Amino acid sequence: MGQVNVGSWLAEIAQYMHSNTLGVFGNTPTANIFLGALPDSPVLAFGLFATGGPYYTGDPLNHLELQALIRRTKNIDGLQYATTLFNLLDDKWNITPSFNGRITPQHRPGPFFISAAGYPVYTLNFRAVLGRS
């Protein structure tokens, strides 16, 4: 497999979340799933970030790291959404239409920080190995 278009892969992950009713993705005023950003508004939002992963025996762009930031108004809501997202991506194969591969978590839901506006933001980190079926 050649190099992965990281933006396209992230958009397909966001669409997968949207299709599983975890949030709204797309060019709409109600969108709350964002790629490469977690804007201040809306408060109930997800930010998805990807980077090239460590170099194994192939191209590091086929071994991606995915981070999800989940902001909610209450701790329990954040943990519930983080757990739902964890379950959607935990050890999943071929969930995006254009990219075959496997997504595995690096930790279970739990860690969070408080945003500048005082809202809990949960973080989840995953590793993806693309180009496998």
Image (cartoon, rainbow, N blue to C red):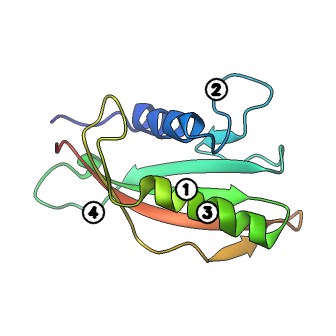
Percent position of residue 120, x then y: 78, 68
Residue at x 79%, y 30% (from the top left corner): 30
The Cα–Cα distance between marks 4 and 1, rounded to whole angstroms, is 24 Å
Q: What amino acid does circle 3 point to?
A: Ala
Using a 10 Å C-alpha cutoff, classify the residue at mark 1 as few (fewer than 14 neighbours), some (14 to 19) or many (20 or more): some
The numbered mark, 4 or 1, whose residue comes first in the sequence reads 4
Q: Is residue 68 above or below residue 9?
A: below
Q: What amino acid does circle 4 point to?
A: Pro
Percent position of residue 126, x then y: 42, 61
Name the residue that disc number 1 marks: 85
Q: Is residue 37 above or below residue 75?
A: above
Cβ atoms at labels 4 and 1 below 8 Å apart? no
The Cα–Cα distance between marks 3 and 1, rounded to whole angstroms, is 5 Å
The numbered mark, 2 or 3, whose residue comes first in the sequence reads 2
Residue closest to the eye, 34 or 80: 80
Q: Is residue 95 above or below residue 78?
A: above
Residue at x 80%, y 26% (from the top left corner): 29
Name the residue that disc number 4 marks: 54
Cβ atoms at labels 3 and 1 below 8 Å apart? yes
* Disc marking residue 72: none
Disc 4 element: loop
Residue at x 29%, y 36% (from the top left corner): 4
Cβ atoms at labels 3 and 4 below 8 Å apart? no
The Cα–Cα distance between marks 3 and 4, rounded to whole angstroms, is 25 Å
Residue at x 76%, y 71% (from the top left corner): 76
Name the residue that disc number 3 marks: 82
Instruction: Determine whether, in the image, residue 25 is placed left or right of residue 86.
Output: right
* Disc marking residue 26: 2
Percent position of residue 124, x then y: 54, 65
